[in-house]
Amino acid sequence: MSVLKLIATTTSVVALSYVTHYAQKKVAEKMLIEGQFSEAEIQAARLGAVFTCTTLIGGPLDQLLNTLFSKH
């Protein structure tokens, strides 16, 4: 693996982790403010945020990295 690909992959993983953490935090905060959700529902919503972030952001990032660093 080239150094540039390693740096790009690490950067995308860190960015995805940050976005996922932020989304989970915001979902939990909003649901706690409402006050009508159980702890299990909040955990399910946080899991949904993880799935959504990895699907909508992680997938395209992976495709972009594969396109940029593909071997011909």
Image: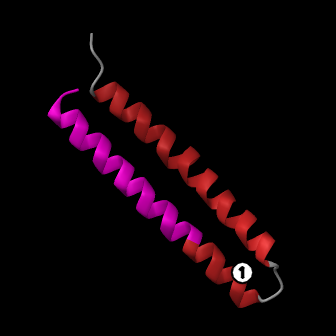
Q: Quadrant of residue 61?
A: top left
Quarter of the N terminus within the rendering = top left
Q: Nearer the viewer, residue 63 or 45?
A: 45
Q: Is residue 44 above or below residue 34?
A: above
Which residue shows up at 30% across the image and 20% down it? 70
Expressed as whole percent of the image width and height from the top left, the position of residue 59 reads: 50, 39
- Quadrant the C terminus occupies: top left
Based on the picture, tell me whether residue 37 belongs to the magenta stretch: no
Image-based side of 29 in relation to 57, left or right: right
Above-or-below relation of 69 to 44: above
Note whether 54 is above or below 40 in the view shown. above
Residue under label 1, please give it. 31
Q: Residue at x 31, y 41 (%)?
A: 9
* Bounds of the magenta segment: 1-24
Where residue 68 sits, quadrant-wise, is: top left
Q: Name the residue type under label 1.
A: Met
